[in-house]
Image: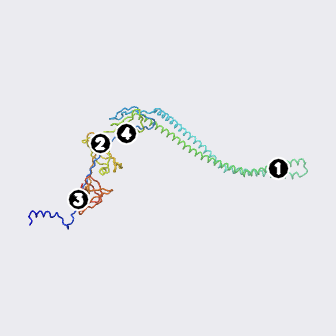
Amino acid sequence: MLSVPLLVSSLCLAPLVARADDPPAPPPTPKLGLVESGALNLVTERSARIASAKKSLLRFEPEAFGGTVTVEKVLAKPGPVTAGTVIAQLKAKDFDKALSDLRIQVAEATERFAVAQEEATLARTSDAMAMERTERGHMLAEQRMRHSREYYFPKSLDLAKVRLQDQADGLKDQGDELAQLERMYSDATLESETKDIVIGRARRGFERSRTYFDYGQKDHELFLTFDHPNSVREAEDNLRYSQIGLDHLRIRQRLGAINARLGLASAARNLDDLNLRLTRMEGDAKRLTVTAPVDGLMALSLPEEGEPVGGSALMATIVDPSSLELTGNLDVEAIRILGPGSTLEVWLTSRPESSGQATITELSPLGAADGTGANYPFVASVQNRTGEWPLGAEARVVARKSIPGCTLVPAKAVKSSNGRWTVEVWTDGKRVEREVRIGASDGKVMQVITGLTPGEQVVLPDA
């Protein structure tokens, strides 16, 4: 029989000895995290720079002079400056000669424009007189044509016919008189000499009349065939030429008026251009004396004395130290929290006791590539501050945002691979991989958009 101590010891060791027919022991439970529902509180802290919200860039920007400009003398030093203070004196090579030549050109152009105006007035008067003469000549040609058709052309035809008929009648009368004389002198009682004289004279007159009549018939035929039609054609052509001349004169005068207007416009434009250039040149003369446009703190960018100054060269920057703003960059995570109108808590790195608030007024919609991410420039207006904030100093900006009603999972439970986000869900004592869609994160917990529900458990890494 066993002793009591030995029996107890045997009973305690019995469970540690596995039998061959016992089932395998279950795997140990991993470290688990709970999927919860709640608000996600996001905080972002970024670096920014203090700048002036009111900045004046003083540049040398000549508007007309294109020659060489150098720094003659620098008259101010960097630091506080008041409006109107002379900063520097510039020197432009051959500037006075160029300005004098331009003034002469303006005076000449003014005289040429006045001459062009007088010539245009004279041309309009001459055109009016020429048009009046031409229109009157055309009117007279129309009158002549109308009278010729109504009176002169029919009259000339009738007179030609009457003249021919008169010659025919005269020839017939002379023939009848010759026959009558020959019958009268057939009686031999008269002297032969007397008879021969009378009858010979009559016969000669008759022959001459016949010759005239023959030519008269030919003249009448030529008149009807050529002279009369040519007279009608000439009158019609004169009227047509008169109309064409009147039309051409109107066209020439219209084109001349257009050319005159173009000439005047060109002369006026040239005069305006020269006056504008003179105004700009006189302005350039004032710009050679560089003055501060506003009060503020000034930083000089002028070349050394004697060195050239290029066009649009920056000569000085003047800022207003009483009007401040912050400039910096936000990453993709930060713009989840911040946007135009967002309020920032601000404090200076070098002066933690100096703090204030700022409001984002500008946020670039386009980010500049930065490694695997992007930076989005922003500008924030300073609402209030304590102490003096030096321009250019580094500041820290902090912003907070709460997203209510989120499904939250411990951030270390989420794995990323090839653009996929997954977690291992502990279900019925087993690990089950599940793909999820994530949102924002505060570094400890992460927002899950889809894939998990509150109350589920996820596997956490051992480390």
Q: Amino acid at mark 4?
A: Leu
**Residue marked by disc 1:** 207
Mark 2 surroundings: few (<14), some (14-19) or many (≥20) residues within 10 A: many
The x, y position of residue 118, in whole percent, is: 54, 38
**Residue marked by disc 2:** 394
**Residue marked by disc 3:** 30
User: Of circles 4 and 2, which is in front?
Assistant: 2
Dot 3 lies on which element?
loop
The x, y position of residue 347, in whole percent, is: 26, 43
Residue 442's place in the image compared with 114, above or below, is below
Of all residues, the one furthest to the front in this rendering is 1
| Quadrant of the image containing the N terminus | bottom left
**Residue marked by disc 4:** 57
Q: Amino acid at mark 2?
A: Glu
- How far is disc 3 from disc 2 in space, using C-alphas? 46 Å
Mark 3 or mark 2: whose residue is earlier in sequence:
3
| In the foreground, 122 or 170 | 122
Residue at (59% x, 42% y) in the render: 130
User: Of circles 4 and 3, which is in front?
Assistant: 3
User: Of circles 1 and 3, which is in front?
Assistant: 3
User: Of circles 1 and 2, which is in front?
Assistant: 2
Marks 1 and 2 close (CB-CB < 8 Å): no
Residue at (82% x, 50% y) in the render: 207
Mark 1 or mark 3: whose residue is earlier in sequence:
3
- How far is disc 4 from disc 2 in space, using C-alphas? 23 Å
Mark 1 or mark 4: whose residue is earlier in sequence:
4
Mark 1 or mark 2: whose residue is earlier in sequence:
1
